[in-house]
C-alpha cells in the first residue's frame, strides 16, 4: 500500500458540510486491491484480537459488531484502515467516529476519510493505520501502545488548554466564528472589525497594566495593602542575608516564591527551618531574581474567579495527596488514585494523574518517608506544595457559600489591580466567614487564571464560567460577524467578486476581497497570486479594518482544506462547466457541481443563495440550501424564472436590453446593458451574466437601485479594475485583448464576444494546460481554430506534469478538427509569442491572448503601448 497524499479539512468541505475536521487520505492499495479481507488468512482473528473494542463499530450494518461482520464477509483494506484510524484516536482519548471510504477514480485508489479532533493527531493516525493494517496482513507483531502514547503526547502539545477551549466551545455554541492565531492559545473570536481576541484567559479588553501588576507580586501586594486588603506579612529578598533578615522579621513557618512566577513554579510552602529556607530560595531564583518571603498562612486554599468585575465561581483546592490505609505503600496509594477514570494524561480528562516528581520526593524526605513507606491508616499526605489541578490536585466548588463580604472584597480587588478576568488566591479556614474574622489573607491575584477547576470540579456544581467571558466580550446587541459574500463557479467568479466589492465599497464599507490575482483590502493589493483558498479567506477575516468580505472561492482551496469560513450571508454560483476534471478525485461534472455546491450550503438561514437558473447543475443546488433562494437568468422566459416569480421569489434577468431585478411579478429595471462598461456596449453577453448576481447581491443587502446603477456603470474593465478580464488595448492600427479564458466554456464565451468585434484579421495566443484532460486541451484547440485566422501556441510557465511536446500536439489535434484553413504558429515563450503577434499585427486586426500569468502579459502589452506612444508623440 502507498499513501499518495494526506490532507486536513478545516471547514465545510466536499465530504461534509457539518463535520469540518476531516482527514482525507488518498491511498493506493496496490496489490491488496485484489485481496479483500475474507481472502487474507487469519486477518479477521488478528484484527479482533488487536482491537476488541471495535465491536462497537456499527458500520453500514447498523448494529454493534457490524464492522466485524463486514470484515468476515469481505471488505477492502481502505475501509479497514478508515476504522483503524478512528479506533486508535478513540483509544488515545479522542473519541471521534465519522468515516467514509470512496473510490478515487482509479482502480485500487481510494479516498479514506475520517474525523479528527487534533489535526496532527489525525495525520499521524492516517499513517499509523496504514502501518497497522499492513502488519495485520503480514501477520507481524505491532506495538500499538507506542502509537497510542505518541498520539496522546501530540494532542497535549497541539490542543488548546481547557480554559481557552471552554471559551471557544461557548463561542461556537452561540454561532460566533473563531480562528486560532498561533500554535499556542492566541485565538480570535468573530471576524474583521468585530473581532475580539483571547490568549488563554486574558482578553483583548484586559488592561496591559493590570496584567503587569498581577505578574509582579511585589506591586500586587503593595496595592492590596494600600487598599486595606488582608495580605500575609512578608518581604522581597534576593540573597541569603535578605532571607535571614526576613525570617527574623516574619518568623516561621514561611512561604518562599518567585516574584513573577505562575502555575506554582518555584513555590515552597510551610518552611520551618533554615536548610529548607535556603533550598526554597534557590528553587525560586530559578524562576526570578527577586523572591517573596511571606508568613505561611494556615487554612484551606481557595480560588475566587472574577470576570467583568463580578464573582462568578469559587473553589476549594486540595493538593495532590494520598490517604493511608495502613497496608499500602505511598506508591501503591498513588497508583490506586490514578486508577480513577476521571484522571488522565495532561488535560485529557477532568483530573490529571499524580506523578512522583522532585517536589514530591522533597516532601517525602522532609517527613522521613519514601515511596515505599506504608502510610498509617487515615493519614493525609500532600505530595505537592501547591494545589494546582495540573499537578494532580482536586477542586470542590464553593461558589454558593462565599460570604458576601468576601464577594465584595474579590470584586473590589479586580478593580484595584485593574483586571477584567482574574483569579484571586485566598487562604482561610472558612470562606463562608469574612477574612478579617478568620485571620485569612489574599495570597495572589492571577491574570489569565485557569478555568478547569470551575468547569469540572472534583466535587460540587460545575460552573460555565466561559459564558461570562463571552458575555463580556459580546454584550447583548453586538455582533461578532461581518457580512460575507462568497462567489464560486467555473467562469466569471473574479469579475463578479470585483464588481460586488466595488459596489460595497461605494456604499461606505471597508471591503476585503479575495480573487485569483490577489487579496485586496480597500483596493490595496496585499497578497499577490491565486488567492481563492481558505488561507486568503482567513487573511481577510482576520483583518481588523475590514467590515465587509467578498470572497472568490475556487475548487482548489476547497479540496485542499475546505472553506475558510463556516457560514456566509450570500453565496453566488455563476455556472458549472468542465474545468480541472480528473484532479483530486473530481472526475465528472456532477462531482464538480457537488464541490461547488458546498458554498451555497453554508448560507445562513437568514441569508440568500444566488443561483444561475440557466445552468441545470447550479439550479439543482437549491435543494440543499437552508436559506433563501434568488435566481438569475439571461432569459426572462426561462420556466424556472417564471415559476420563481409566480411564487413571489427574487430574481435578476436580462430583458429588452436591461438588467432587471424582479420581486414576484414586479420588475425594477436597473440599467441598460449597453450603458454598463463591463459589457462592452452589450456585446460581451457573458459579462451581462456576471452583472446579474452582482445587482441581486446589492439589492439583498438593502442598497437602493440608484446606488446599484451607479456602481455597475462606474466599474470600468481595465488592468487595474479587472486584470486579465476583457482588457482591451487600442493601438494605432489594431487592438489587443487580454483575457483569462482557460477552459472550453470560457473560450466559447470569449469567442461569442470576439465574433462581435469588427476586425479584418483575428489572431489568438493560446496554451495547453497540463492539469486538464486531453479532451479539454483538444477542445480548446478546436474552439481557437473557430475563433481565429491564426493561432499562436505558447506554453505556460508551469506544465503541471505534462511535456511541452504533448500539450502542443493536443492543441494541434484540436485545431485540425476544424475544417477551415487556420494558420498555426508555435512559439513556446509567452513573451516571444506576444512580441511576434504585436509586431506582425495587420491594420484593423485583433490580437487576443489567453494568459494564465495575467500580470506578466499585461506588463508586456502595456510596455508595447508605451513604446508606441513615445513614437507617436
Image: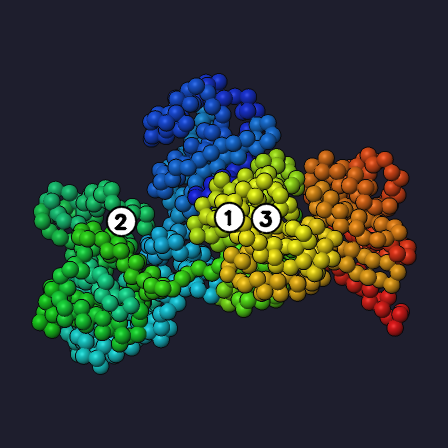
Residue 277 visible to an observer of this rendering: no
Tell me residue 583's x, y (percent).
62, 39
Where does the C terminus fall, quadrant-wise? bottom right
Instruction: Report the residue marked by disc 3.
Output: 632
* Number of other residues with Cα within 10 Å of mark 1, as a class: few under 14, some 14 to 19, many 20 or more: some
Instruction: Report the residue marked by disc 2.
Output: 350
Badge 3 marks a residue whose secondary structure is: strand
Q: Nearer the viewer, residue 51 or 670?
A: 670
Q: Nearer the viewer, residue 397 or 862?
A: 862
Tell me residue 781's x, y (percent).
78, 40
Q: Earlier in the sequence, mark 3 or mark 2?
A: 2
Going 49% across and 45% down the picture, which residue do you hit?
Answer: 647
Instruction: Report the residue marked by disc 1.
Output: 649
* Marks 3 and 1, how far apart at CA: 11 Å
Tell me residue 418's x, y (percent).
30, 74
* Marks 3 and 2, how far apart at CA: 54 Å
Q: In screen coordinates, is 262 left or right of 103? A: left
Q: Earlier in the sequence, mark 3 or mark 1?
A: 3
Amino acid at each position: 500500500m502507498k499513501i499518495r497524499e494526506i490532507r486536513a479539512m478545516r471547514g465545510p468541505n466536499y465530504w461534509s458540510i457539518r463535520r469540518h475536521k476531516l482527514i482525507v487520505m488518498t491511498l493506493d492499495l496496490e496489490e491488496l486491491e485484489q485481496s479483500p479481507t475474507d481472502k487474507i488468512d487469519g486477518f479477521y482473528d488478528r484484527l479482533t484480537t488487536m482491537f476488541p473494542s471495535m465491536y462497537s463499530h456499527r458500520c453500514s450494518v447498523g448494529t454493534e459488531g457490524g464492522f466485524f461482520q463486514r470484515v468476515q464477509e469481505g471488505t477492502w483494506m481502505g475501509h479497514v484502515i478508515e476504522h483503524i484510524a478512528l479506533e486508535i484516536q478513540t483509544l488515545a482519548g479522542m473519541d471521534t467516529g465519522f468515516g467514509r471510504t470512496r473510490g478515487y477514480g482509479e482502480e485500487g485508489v481510494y479516498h479514506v476519510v475520517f474525523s479528527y479532533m487534533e489535526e496532527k493527531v489525525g495525520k499521524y493516525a492516517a499513517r499509523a493505520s496504514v502501518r497497522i493494517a499492513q502488519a495485520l496482513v503480514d501477520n507481524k507483531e505491532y506495538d500499538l501502545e507506542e502509537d497510542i502514547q505518541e498520539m496522546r503526547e501530540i494532542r497535549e502539545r497541539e490542543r488548546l488548554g481547557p480554559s481557552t477551549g471552554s471559551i471557544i466551545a461557548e463561542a461556537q455554541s452561540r454561532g460566533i466564528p473563531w480562528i486560532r492565531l498561533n500554535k499556542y492559545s492566541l485565538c480570535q473570536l468573530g471576524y474583521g472589525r468585530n473581532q475580539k481576541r483571547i490568549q488563554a484567559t486574558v482578553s483583548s479588553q484586559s488592561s496591559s497594566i493590570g496584567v503587569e501588576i498581577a505578574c509582579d507580586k511585589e506591586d500586587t501586594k503593595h496595592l492590596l495593602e494600600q487598599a486595606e486588603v488582608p495580605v500575609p506579612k512578608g518581604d522581597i529578598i534576593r540573597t541569603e542575608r535578605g532571607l535571614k533578615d526576613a525570617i527574623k522579621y516574619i518568623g516561621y513557618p514561611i512561604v518562599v516564591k518567585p516574584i513573577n512566577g505562575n502555575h506554582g513554579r518555584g513555590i515552597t510552602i510551610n518552611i520551618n527551618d533554615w536548610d529548607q529556607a535556603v533550598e526554597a530560595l534557590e528553587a525560586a531564583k530559578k524562576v526570578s531574581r527577586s523572591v517573596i518571603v511571606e508568613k505561611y498562612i494556615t487554612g484551606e486554599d481557595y480560588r475566587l474567579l472574577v470576570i467583568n468585575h463580578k464573582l462568578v465561581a469559587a473553589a476549594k483546592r486540595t493538593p495532590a495527596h494520598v490517604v493511608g490505609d495502613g497496608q499500602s505503600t505511598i506508591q501503591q496509594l498513588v497508583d490506586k488514585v490514578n486508577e480513577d477514570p476521571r484522571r488522565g494524561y495532561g488535560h485529557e480528562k477532568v483530573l490529571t494523574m499524580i506523578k512522583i516528581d522532585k517536589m514530591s520526593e522533597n516532601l517525602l524526605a522532609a517527613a522521613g518517608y519514601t515511596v515505599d513507606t506504608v502510610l498509617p491508616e487515615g493519614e493525609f499526605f500532600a505530595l505537592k506544595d501547591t494545589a494546582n489541578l495540573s499537578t494532580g490536585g482536586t477542586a470542590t466548588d464553593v461558589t454558593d457559600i462565599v460570604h458576601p463580604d468576601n464577594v465584595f472584597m474579590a470584586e473590589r480587588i479586580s478593580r484595584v489591580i485593574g483586571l477584567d478576568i482574574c483569579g484571586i488566591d485566598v487562604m482561610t479556614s472558612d470562606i463562608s466567614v469574612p477574612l478579617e474574622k478568620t485571620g485569612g489573607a489574599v495570597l495572589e491575584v492571577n491574570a489569565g487564571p485557569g478555568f478547569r477547576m470551575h468547569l469540572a470540579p472534583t466535587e460540587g456544581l460545575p460552573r460555565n464560567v466561559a459564558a461570562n467571558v463571552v458575555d463580556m466580550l459580546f454584550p447583548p446587541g453586538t455582533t461578532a460577524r461581518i457580512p460575507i459574500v462568497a462567489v464560486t463557479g467555473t467562469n466569471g467568479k473574479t469579475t463578479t467578486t470585483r464588481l460586488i466589492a466595488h459596489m460595497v465599497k461605494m456604499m461606505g464599507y471597508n471591503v476585503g476581497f479575495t480573487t485569483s490575482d490577489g487579496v485586496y483590502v480597500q483596493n490595496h493589493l496585499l497578497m499577490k497570486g491565486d488567492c481563492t483558498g481558505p488561507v486568503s479567506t482567513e487573511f481577510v477575516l482576520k483583518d481588523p479594518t475590514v467590515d465587509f468580505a467578498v470572497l472568490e472561492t475556487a475548487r482548489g482551496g476547497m479540496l485542499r482544506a475546505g472553506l475558510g469560513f463556516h457560514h456566509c450571508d450570500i453565496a453566488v454560483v455563476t455556472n458549472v462547466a468542465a474545468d480541472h476534471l480528473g484532479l483530486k478525485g473530481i472526475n465528472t461534472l456532477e462531482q464538480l457541481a457537488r464541490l461547488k455546491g458546498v458554498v451555497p450550503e453554508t448560507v445562513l438561514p437568514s441569508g440568500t443563495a444566488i443561483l444561475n437558473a440557466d445552468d441545470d447543475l447550479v439550479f439543482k443546488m437549491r435543494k440543499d440550501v437552508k436559506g433563501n433562494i434568488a435566481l438569475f437568468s439571461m432569459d426572462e422566459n426561462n420556466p424556472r424564472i417564471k415559476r420563481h416569480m409566480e411564487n413571489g421569489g427574487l430574481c435578476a434577468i436580462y430583458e429588452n436590453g436591461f438588467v432587471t431585478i424582479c420581486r414576484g411579478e414586479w420588475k425594477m429595471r436597473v440599467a441598460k446593458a449597453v450603458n454598463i462598461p463591463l459589457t462592452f456596449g452589450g456585446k460581451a453577453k457573458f459579462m451581462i451574466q456576471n452583472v446579474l448576481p452582482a445587482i441581486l447581491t446589492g439589492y439583498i443587502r438593502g442598497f437602493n437601485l440608484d446606488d446599484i446603477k451607479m456602481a455597475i456603470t462606474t466599474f470600468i474593465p481595465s488592468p487595474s479594475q479587472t486584470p486579465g478580464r476583457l482588457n482591451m488595448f487600442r493601438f494605432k492600427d489594431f487592438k489587443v485583448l487580454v483575457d483569462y479564458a482557460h477552459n472550453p466554456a470560457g473560450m466559447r464565451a470569449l469567442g461569442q464576444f470576439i465574433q462581435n468585434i469588427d476586425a479584418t484579421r483575428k489572431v489568438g495566443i493560446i496554451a495547453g494546460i497540463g492539469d486538464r484532460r486531453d479532451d479539454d486541451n483538444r477542445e480548446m484547440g478546436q474552439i481557437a481554430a473557430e475563433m481565429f485566422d491564426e493561432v499562436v501556441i505558447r506554453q505556460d510557465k508551469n506544465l503541471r506534469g505534462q511535456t511541452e511536446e504533448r500539450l502542443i500536439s493536443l492543441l494541434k489535434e484540436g485545431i485540425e478538427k476544424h475544417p477551415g484553413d487556420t494558420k498555426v504558429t508555435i512559439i513556446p515563450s509567452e513573451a516571444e509569442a506576444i512580441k511576434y503577434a504585436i509586431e506582425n499585427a495587420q491594420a484593423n486586426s485583433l490580437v487576443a491572448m489567453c494568459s494564465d500569468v495575467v500580470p506578466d502579459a499585461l506588463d508586456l502589452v502595456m510596455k508595447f503601448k508605451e513604446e508606441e506612444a513615445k513614437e507617436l508623440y
